[in-house]
Image (spheres, rainbow, N blue to C red):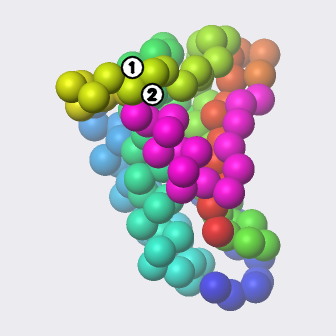
């Protein structure tokens, strides 16, 4: 990873099923341009998929994705218009869903939420 600063990437995404794929593409392009390691890039793609999927499933309105380069790696932020904070659910072994925040926690150095006047930002730092 290079040490020079990089300009954050910020985009508005629709709260639709295709938003996760669009977010993965944006994150992939950003981390490639910044020279982020392939391992961190792969983890970032999985984490942004989960963050955006959760926002599409549980929030309303357009989503704001921000991808920033940090000294140690990458910070992903997904802002939505719901004040409801994400909560990990007990995993049901027979369900294909419900593991998103477990994946985010496992792949991120740190993650959390920040309230905003219009909803919240769910963020994760990787690297």
**Residue 11 vertical placement versus 27 (above, below):** above
Q: Position of residue 79 (x, y in %)?
A: 62, 31
Read off the magenta span: 99-114
**Residue under the image location 53 percent in, 81 percent down:** 37
Q: Residue at x 48, y 26 (%)?
A: 55
Residue highlighted by disc 2: 54
Q: Which residue is situated farthest in the front direction here?
A: 93
- Indicate whether 31 appears above or below 43: below
Q: Is residue 53 magenta?
A: no
Locate the C terminus and report the quarter of the image it occupies: bottom right
Q: Position of residue 20 (x, y in %)?
A: 36, 41
Q: For marks 2 and 1, give the CA distance.
A: 5 Å
Q: Is residue 66 visible?
A: no
Location of residue 48 with respect to 39 vertically, above or below: above
Give the residue at mark 1.
Answer: 57
- Residue 47 lies left or right of residue 97; in this view the side is right
Q: Are the residues flagged by discs 2 and 1 in contact, CB closer than 8 Å?
A: yes
Q: Residue at x 54, y 25 (%)?
A: 88
Dot 2: element: helix
In the rendered image, the quadrant that contains the N terminus is: bottom right
Q: Residues within 10 Å of mark 1 (few under 14, many from 20)?
A: few
Q: Which residue is at 68% across, 43% downward?
A: 111
Q: Is residue 6 rendered to the left or right of residue 107?
A: right
Q: Give left or right: position of 95 versus 125.
A: left
Under circle 1, the secondary element is: helix
In the rendered image, residue 3, in percent from the top left (x then y), is placed at 76, 85
How many labels were placed on the picture?
Answer: 2
Instruction: Please name whichever residue, 100 or 73, is drawn nearer the observer in this view of the structure.
Output: 100
**Snapshot quadrant of residue 18:** top left
Does the magenta run of residues contain 107? yes
């Amino acid at each position: 990873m290079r040490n020079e600063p990089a300009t954050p990437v910020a985009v508005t995404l629709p709260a639709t099923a295709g938003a996760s794929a669009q977010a993965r593409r944006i994150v992939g392009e950003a981390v490639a341009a910044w020279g982020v390691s392939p391992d961190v890039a792969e983890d970032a793609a999985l984490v942004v998929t989960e963050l955006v999927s959760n926002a599409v499933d549980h929030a309303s309105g357009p989503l704001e994705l921000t991808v920033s380069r940090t000294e140690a790696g990458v910070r992903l932020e997904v802002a939505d218009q719901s004040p409801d904070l994400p909560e990990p659910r007990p995993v049901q072994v027979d369900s294909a869903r419900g593991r998103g925040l477990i994946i985010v926690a496992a792949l991120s150095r740190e993650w959390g939420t920040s309230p905003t006047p219009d909803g919240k930002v769910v963020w994760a730092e990787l690297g």
